[in-house]
Amino acid sequence: MNWLADTVLVVHALIILFIVGGLIAIWAGARLKRGWIRNPAFRQVHLVAIGVVAILAVLDIPCPLTVLEDWLRTGRVGLQGIVQRWVSYWLYYDLPGWLFATAYAAFLLVVAVTWFRIPPRS
């Protein structure tokens, strides 16, 4: 089951990359006058993705992907596999949960403001 847990971890990392990289791409694309950044489907998925992350964090609900990965890896929260350890090393820090919830909510606000400042096509 470790290969499946590693797959969930990679999907999780790709979602994070989509959320953060998507906002950077929107800003850069607006500056470079790229039409694809106004694609409504892309923008809606991007907004919903960070919205889910922020809502889960504010409500103090564990990320379902993290829970699934832990369950697949150990059947409980516990030991980390090699892929998880290195990705975790780069993605997670030992800071209070409220700080992450605030950061996610602020990132959601930035994405929402970007939605209005650089609107998708109708």
Image (tube, rainbow, N blue to C red):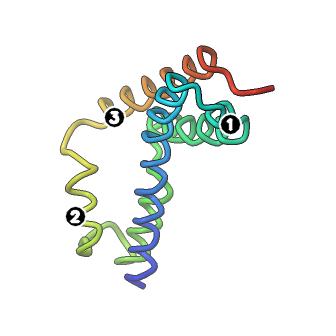
Q: Amino acid at mark 3?
A: Phe
Left/right placement of residue 17 relative to residue 95 reads: right
Please tell me whether mark 3 sits on a helix, a strand or a loop.
helix
Image coords of residue 49 (percent x, y)? 57, 42
Q: On the image, numbered disc 1 is attached to which residue?
A: 44
Q: Are marks 3 and 2 in contact (CB under 8 Å)?
A: no
Give the residue at mark 3. Answer: 100
What is the number of the mark on residue 86?
A: 2
> What is the CA distance from the residue labelled 1 to the residue labelled 3?
23 Å
Q: Are marks 1 and 2 in contact (CB under 8 Å)?
A: no
Category of crowding for the residue at label 3, using alpha-carbon neighbours closer than 10 angstroms: few (below 14), some (14–19), many (at least 20): some
Q: In the image, is residue 101 above or below residue 69?
A: above
Q: Work out whether 117 lies above or below 63.
A: above
Q: CA distance from mark 1 to mark 2?
A: 31 Å
Residue at the (56%, 35%) spot, across then down = 51
Lower sequence index among marks 1 and 3 = 1
Compared to 122, does 95 lie above or below? below
Disc 1: CA contacts within 10 A as few (<14), some (14-19) or many (>=20): few
Q: Decide which of tag 1 and tag 2 comes sooner along the chain.
A: 1
Amino acid type at mark 1? Gln
